Image (spheres, rainbow, N blue to C red):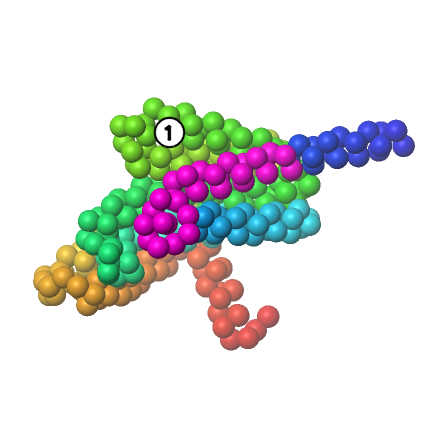
Amino acid sequence: MRKATASSAVAAWELRLVGIIVVTLVAFGIVAVYGASSIWAVQSDEPGSFFARRQIVGALVGIVVLLVATRIDYHVWQRNAWLILGAVVLVLIVPATVGLFVLAEPVIALLFQHGAFAQADTAQTTLALRYYLVGLVGASIDLPLVFAFYARQDTFRPAMVGVLGVVFYLLVALPTYRTLGMIGLILANDAQLVGHALIMVMLFQRRIGTLGGLGIGETLLKSLLASAVMGIAVYGTMWGVELLLPSQGRLLWAVTVLVGGSIGLGSYLGLCALLQVNELQVMLAIALKFATGKR
């Protein structure tokens, strides 16, 4: 009885500490967003808190997702960890990152280059996006692992790793933001995401179990190979479209995105089928069941 009471007291203490850490990190993020975007928002005829309010909404959604994840039995995450990690990260995020890196400029131009958003703004946004993509894979690896800890009612360790993530951010941001400006801050964000993911992988292996023997390395190599070939195919398509449509404008951007994206998707799926990437086959089978109404 005493042991159960002591365990409940520890759990309550950890919960309060995690709550304080989460509130602190969310507040830090909202203040950082407000400080970085308020002037730009006002210059764009928006309230100074425009982007901060959107960040608050995102934080609230994240808290709801956290609470939902804590209600799921961690055995569910453990059984499906490789399918989630392999399918979402290795099979989807890696090629999406490569494709978006190559098509970044025409995508941004098509979506935003009009009115006061000039070609120079497209170039700067493209540069920022490509640097941000460095941390995308790390964030994708991190999310299912964090959910696995939440499902075990363990919110303390992910929160502590979140604090370390802020340390990683500051270690890169402080020496680089004056010399590199925006790029220094983006690299700091990449370091935060990748560092957080690496620590979560180590904690996952120690607390829940290793994913060794499940073919992670093989799937990663196949995905990287298929993504690299896809990237070359998309780049070649962009070059060909520019030769056929030398004039700048929405028509060129739209055709580049549509044709380049289609060829990239087709080449990636074909190579994955050739290389027998099982995770993709499972995902396609699940999608087919939903599309045909079968359960």
Count of picture labels: 1
Instruction: Give residue 227's position: percent from left, percent from top.
Output: 32, 50
Q: Is residue 257 visible?
A: yes
Q: Is residue 290 above or below residue 124?
A: below
Q: Quadrant of residue 254?
A: bottom left
**Is residue 169 rendered magenta in the image?**
no
The quadrant in which the N terminus is found is top right
Kindly state the secondary structure of the residue where label 1 is placed: helix
Q: What is the span of residues highlighted in magenta in the rendered image?
A: 19-48
Instruction: Give residue 230's position: percent from left, percent from top.
Output: 28, 54
Q: Is residue 244 above or below residue 93?
A: below
Q: Most prominent secondary structure in the magenta stretch? A: helix
Residue at 18%, 58% in the rendered image: 238
Q: Is residue 267 visible?
A: no
Residue at 44%, 42% in the rendered image: 34
The residue carrying pointer 1 sits among few (fewer than 14), some (14 to 19) or many (20 or more) residues within 10 Å by Cα, namely many
**205 relative position to 96: left or right:** right
**Is residue 44 rendered magenta in the image?**
yes
Residue at 28%, 56% in the rendered image: 108
Q: For mark 1, what is the residue?
A: 173
Front-most of 21 and 282? Answer: 21
Residue at 41%, 25% in the rendered image: 171
Type of amino acid at the residue the image marks with label 1: Ala
Q: Is residue 58 above or below residue 283?
A: above
**294 relative position to 67: left or right:** left
Instruction: Give residue 251's position: percent from left, percent from top.
Output: 19, 68
The quadrant in which the C terminus is found is bottom right
Instruction: Give residue 51's position: percent from left, percent from top.
Output: 43, 49
Front-most of 133 and 163? Answer: 163
